[in-house]
Image (cartoon, rainbow, N blue to C red):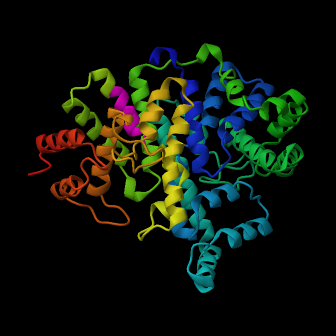
Amino acid sequence: MAATLKLSELISSLSYALDITEGQPEGHGIRSCWIGMHIGQCIGLPPQQLWDLYYAILLKDLGCSSNAARICELYQTDDRSFKQDFKQVGAGLPQLLGFVFKNTGTHSAGWTRRAVSILKVLRHGRAMADELINTRCHRGADIARQLRFNENVARGIQSLDEHWDGSGRPLGLRGDAIPLNSRIALLAQVIDVFHITHGRQAALDQALRRAGGWFDPELVAAFRRVGARTDFWRQLEADDVDQAVLKLEPAQWAVPLDEDYLDEIAEGFGQVVDSKSPFTAGHSQRVGHYADQIAAELELGLERRRWLKRGALLHDVGKLGVSNTILDKPGKLEADEWEAVKRHAGYTEAILGRIEHFAELAWVAGAHHERPDGGGYPRGLSGDAIALETRIITAADIFDAINAERPYHPATPAPQTLDIMRRHLGSAIDPACFAALEQVLRQEGALS
């Protein structure tokens, strides 16, 4: 399987997970890549530099989940709508103030508390923005390095928010001191946001308006040349733009995936998921471990265990599309909030299902909230209609959700966690998977 799957196919598909983290319409990363690669070709970048640019753009939002909880805390608002709106804010003070008033304190109780939140942002906004962007940029670059990408890609991600005139973050770099990949990625990002929201002319207007400020004027000039071609826009707006983007990767630099690299990418994106909330730090890694060990107890083969662990690492990738105002809420969820949480399972299946080789894994991972008694979601499957591998992930997931601290309960010791789980054997939890989990915990000394 791995021998026929290319890195570009996997990363371009997983970029949809980064889109929902940012509250962007699906395909934002793909479209940004289409735009940026054409700018890169227009200025004559050689194949190696185009390859670096390709992945710097697809992975530009790799660190964005890491500041989601902090956005909610600092601005008292929904992180996804905050990020979505922020991508349309220009450099002018009126726009910035309008954004602050619209997006600050929306989850505060009453106008008095909202006013306090707004005043706090007006007083400390620069320091708050510095913290958020620094966290995101460095985290994204670190994960890119873990995924074997070179420094040109990592630095391209790290400096995404630097501006040509030195007004950007996190370092206030100016002009050519900003990595070229960053300059192109930022321009491509803004073009896509305004094009998808307001149309072609709005995208061009924003590029021209910010030339010499946010953007390298020579790159804006290159975009004007690219944008004069109707075929560029036609493909950008086509349903199969993702397939067109796959063809933009320089063929001589295409990377086939082996099993080890697949494992590393699953672990890396598991970290992206876990960074979304302080309460899920390490969750995907632990679920992957428990699922693998349960599978070993149930005598699944090594190849199947390896495949299953990837699904366990990525089972919550859909939670990137759920607001932290819900994920980190300490009290009981309202009905609409619970529906939003439940949608994450479908998001997981949809994102992983974009990868042809992951079709079965998408089904298995996306079904991890199904129950043997048919009371689960998203499909209400029951009994043997739920794959064994899904039941394994479910047991591992439930154990860690109870065992680890969550906003709605403190950490629960392993023995008590198992006691709670026993009450749901046969209804929510598969008995054989539970027995295997108990044996694993006993062998690891967690029950002593």
Q: Residue at x 53, y 57 (%)?
A: 340
Instruction: Please identify the residue farthest to the bottom as the structure is shown.
Output: 112
The residue at the point 18 percent across, 56 percent down is: 419
Q: Which residues are magenta?
A: 306-315
Report if residue 228 is visible in the image.
yes
- In the depicted view, which residue is nearer to us: 401 or 37? 401
The chief SS type of the magenta part is helix
Closer to the camera in the image, 207 or 79: 79
Q: Position of residue 414 (x, y in %)?
A: 19, 54
Q: Please provide percent x and percent y for residue 50.
A: 67, 25
- Whole-percent x, y for residue 9 in the image: 57, 25
Q: Is residue 427 above or below residue 224?
A: below
Left/right placement of residue 3 relative to residue 9 reads left
User: Would residue 129 appear left or right of 359 to someone viewing this image?
Assistant: right
Residue 229 image point, x, y percent? 89, 29
In this rendering, is residue 173 above or below 57? below
- Residue at image position (68%, 41%) is 28
184 drawn magenta:
no
Q: Is residue 307 magenta?
A: yes
Left or right: where 189 falls relative to 342: right
Asked whether the viewer can see residue 139, the reply is: no
Taking the view exactly as shown, the residue that stands out farthest to the left is: 448
What is the tally of numbered marks visible in this picture?
A: 0
The N terminus: image quadrant:
top left
Identity of the residue drawn at 55% across and 37% down: 351
Q: Nearer the viewer, residue 408 or 428?
A: 428
Looking at the image, residue 329 sits to the left or right of residue 50; the answer is left
Q: Quadrant of residue 82?
A: bottom right
